[in-house]
Image: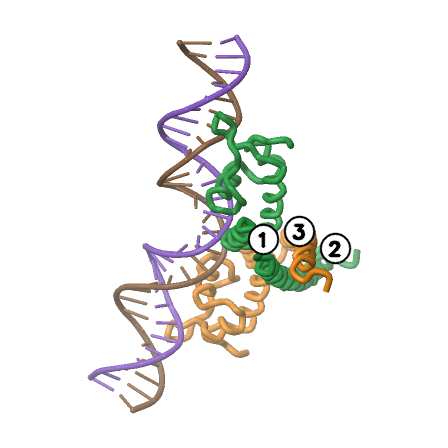
Chain colours: A orange, B green, C purple, D brown
Amino acid sequence: MTSLSIAEAAEQTGLTAHTLRYYERDGLLLHSVERAPSGHRRYTDDDLRWIQMVTRLRATGMPIRDVRRYAALVRDGDGNEAERLDLLLAHREVVERQLAEVSSHLRAIDHKIALYEHKVAPSA
Amino acid sequence: MTSLSIAEAAEQTGLTAHTLRYYERDGLLLHSVERAPSGHRRYTDDDLRWIQMVTRLRATGMPIRDVRRYAALVRDGDGNEAERLDLLLAHREVVERQLAEVSSHLRAIDHKIALYEHKVAPSA
DNA sequence: CTCCGACCTGGAGTGCGCTCCAAGTCAAGC
DNA sequence: GCTTGACTTGGAGCGCACTCCAGGTCGGAG
């Protein structure tokens, strides 16, 4: 069980140290990160795994507030799995609708690109 | 050639009247929208078509500042097609990378969902 | 003993993209 | 002539998600 400084955790997760502190303050983590005797944070593998999940949720556009709700559910322990599932399913819906929308807009933009390619290098 | 009030244009484009004014102020349109004698804006079909393109760029995550650059290029007229193409191609790259990233994160979330589905309704 | 660098905190600041407000104008209906 | 409602403007305000700052602590090296 390695335990990492905030700088190392930042590197591992791709977040900044600032953001790691901010997530903790804002209740996105399952609990306060452990401290070394010096007061410095020490991130465990479990911390990193959870932060990766948070990162996935954020990267797919889940608002901080919803991540916080999800974290609260997980923190509360067994018994609310159905609620967590609902939350994730609802998020999945949103993400898929958004993926479809972006893809469709991208196809339209591609069409425009094709026009410009024709214009810039005509018949060649 | 119909010409629409800002409320009608808002409905057509899915934007709010506020946003339409904001886009115009911020240089995202090709030129100032025409006015009725009363001073009220009148949107032409061309305006709506351009606004739809802006909407596509925005919906795929292009920052306002880049939309403004693109609008400026189009406004400047013929001769900079290669530059417009570059801008659109660069944007396309970004969007595709982002689509891939979101999809990949979504697959991981789906995995988590499957686990919860198993837990909530164990073996059917 | 001093310095350095990594970390700590509460709180302020930033950038983005809207979103709204107050006060005013205009045309139409009563 | 008065009211109503859709619009106008410049500028302020907001929500989000960080991002940074000032001032302080701590442990180790020289």
Q: Is residue B3 above or below residue B111?
A: above
- The chain that hosts pointer 3 is A
Residue position for label 1: B78
Q: Of the residues tagged 3 and 1, which is closer to the observer?
A: 1
Residue position for label 2: B121
Residue position for label 3: A105
Q: Of the residues tagged 3 and 2, which is closer to the observer?
A: 3
Q: Quadrant of the N terminus of chain B?
A: top right
- The chain that hosts pointer 1 is B
Q: Could you classify mark 1 by the number of other residues whose Cα lies within 10 Å: few (under 14), some (14-19), or many (20 or more)? A: few
Q: Amino acid at mark 2?
A: Ala
Q: Amino acid at mark 3?
A: His
Q: Which mark is residue B26?
A: none
Q: Amino acid at mark 1?
A: Asp
Name the one closer to the observer, B62 or B112: B62
Tell me the distance, in whole angstroms, between the alpha carbons under discs 3 and 1.
25 Å
